Amino acid sequence: MEEQLDAFLRYLSSEKGCSENTTAAYRNDLSQFIHFLTGGRSSDQVHWAQVDRDRVIAYVIDLKQRQYAPSTVARKIAALKSFFRFLIARGQLAADPTSGLDAPHVERHLPRPLSADDVARLLDAPPKTNAPKALRDRALLELLYASGMRVSEAVNLRLADVDLATCAVRCSGWGGRERLIPIDARVCQSLATYIEKGRPALVRDPQDEALFLNHRGQKLTRQGLWLIIKAYAEAAQIQGEVTPHTLRHSFAAHRLTSGADVNEVQQLLGHANPATTQVYVQVARSATTEAL
């Protein structure tokens, strides 16, 4: 069983271009299903061809009895469906035991962007000093809001990805897809100041290419970025949870509210599916209606 699971995970990473986090989530969900099938024993004792619809339904019932949230159950069912479709497509399975299996209804919540005032307070939160950390944080916050980058994209930026002459940042997204994101003069200046005065004080290894560094001179992590934003959101007294993805939501919603074309925003966000960007059209409309 594990051999087929490993092949599926490699397929997600290499052919589908899924991120490490997405692939890890599939591994966790499918490993849990294997554990349910085997009762914690060796997976060599069970073959995927032996898994029928009744065993899948028993697993779903077990999840519900253990009081998993409907959204979690739906995600685990989706993982099973994807995996069994993979086995069938490769001729390793004749029938799909998840065929016709319905996931629990999950209420979809629209992303919650910050208001323009909240964004302004957040961007103004870093100290107005030339301390390396303050310069880094100011450039980081302004870049996240101005570009709509994902967390992983921001922490993986290299010095060479920033073109100060044209005020643009080259970003590598999911599946290795690259996009060039223009930034305004204010953000470009903040990045220039950080690169010239802030980063040299943080770097330990002259060969390190990472743009954003932590106090140990290492590449800033996803968790470190999250903590930075959380601290400044609290300092700015912004109500509700503010995460790095909140700035991505805010970027998209505010661009559309200002009249940007949805296709343009899709390209800037790096969405492969236009339907993903359409969610922000609803957010922008809702914000416009509330303002009336």
Image (spheres, rainbow, N blue to C red):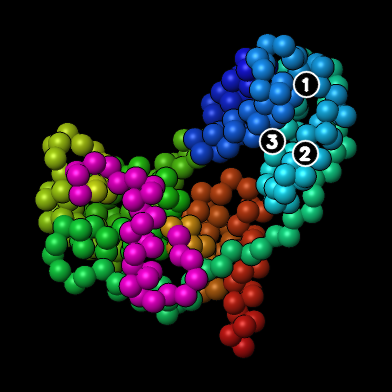
Q: Secondary structure at mark 3?
A: helix
Q: Is residue 249 above or below residue 19?
A: below
Q: Which residue is mark 3?
A: 79
Q: Residue 238: which quarter of the image? A: bottom left
- Label 2 is placed on what type of residue? Asp
Mark 2 lies on residue:
62
Check disc 1 and report the residue beneath it: 88
Rendering coords of residue 277 (x, y %): 60, 57
Magenta residues span: 215-243
Q: CA distance from mark 2 to mark 1?
A: 25 Å
Of badges 2 and 1, the one in the foreground is 2
Label 2: how many Cα within 10 Å (few below 14, some 14–19, many 20+): few
SS assignment at label 2: helix
**Of 145 and 72, which appears nearest the observer?**
72
Q: On the picture, is 196 further left or further right than 22?
A: left
Q: Is residue 136 left or right of residue 276?
A: left
